[in-house]
């Protein structure tokens, strides 16, 4: 895609999205799966949760997309979309458990893959510098909003 930009000046930007989450996400992703299990006060298996990941609330991601559309300086670039604040998966699960007031995670029941990357999170420096973009929703705020959207279902 960037080759199209370089050769033909095709106006494109590549967005490298990390862990986006938010209301009404399908249950095949970590955040909604844990929320569903916690809201139903279920026991659920997890890894030890030592992996660090970056979670971006959907509203912040949409805001980034609009900034990319409006800014011609970003064409031909790759932009990382993340919060810039990685947390351990276990910490995320504990936030969900705390805010949902239930749930029984069983850490260590799922073995980590041999090729599991322990620390996977982006630098959002380019988005901050060129687009003057910064996520506004903290992980705590985003998790609370997401739990609220799912608690209406259960």
Image: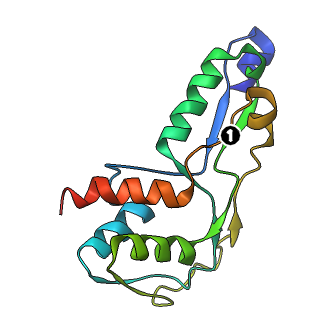
The answer to whether residue 64 is left or right of residue 150 is right
For residue 145, above or below residue 63: below
Q: Quadrant of the N terminus?
A: top right
**Residue 16 x/y as whole percent:** 64, 42
Where does the C terminus fall, quadrant-wise? bottom left
Q: Which residue position holds label 1?
A: 134
The answer to which of 125 and 48 lies nearer the viewer is: 125
Question: 71 and 113: which one is in front?
Answer: 71
> Which image quadrant is residue 152 in?
bottom left
Relative placement, left or right, of 3 versus 108 is right
Q: Looking at the image, how many numbered discs can be counted on the residues? A: 1
Q: Is residue 89 left or right of residue 1?
A: left
Residue at the spot x=47%, y=85% of the render? Answer: 110
Q: Which percent across, then down, holds residue 6?
A: 80, 17
Q: Is residue 39 left or right of residue 60?
A: left
Q: Pick whichever, 8 or 30, lies toward us.
A: 30
Residue drawn at x 79%, y 13% as measured from the top left: 7
The colour scheme used here is rainbow
Image point 33% across, 81% down: which residue? 103
Q: Position of residue 148 (x, y in %)?
A: 31, 56
Residue 77 in percent (x, y) is at: 76, 28
Q: Report the residue that reaches farthest toward the top.
A: 8
Q: Residue at x 69, y 73 (%)?
A: 118
Q: Residues within 10 Å of mark 1 (few under 14, many from 20)?
A: some
Give the structural element (helix, strand or loop) at label 1.
Answer: loop
Up/down of 71 relative to 135, above or below: above
């Amino acid at each position: 895609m960037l080759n199209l930009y370089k050769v033909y000046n095709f106006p494109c930007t590549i967005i490298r999205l990390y862990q986006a989450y938010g209301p009404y996400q399908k249950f095949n992703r970590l955040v909604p799966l844990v929320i569903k299990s916690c809201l139903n006060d279920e026991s659920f298996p997890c890894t030890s949760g030592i992996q660090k990941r970056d979670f971006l609330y959907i509203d912040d991601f949409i805001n980034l997309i609009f900034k990319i559309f409006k800014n011609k300086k970003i064409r031909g670039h790759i932009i990382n979309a993340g919060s810039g604040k990685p947390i351990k998966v276990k910490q995320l699960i504990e936030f969900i458990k705390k805010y949902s007031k239930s749930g029984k995670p069983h850490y260590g029941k799922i073995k980590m893959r041999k090729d599991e990357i322990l620390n996977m999170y982006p630098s959002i420096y380019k988005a901050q510098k060129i687009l003057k973009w910064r996520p506004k929703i903290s992980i705590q705020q985003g998790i609370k909003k997401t739990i609220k959207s799912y608690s209406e279902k259960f």
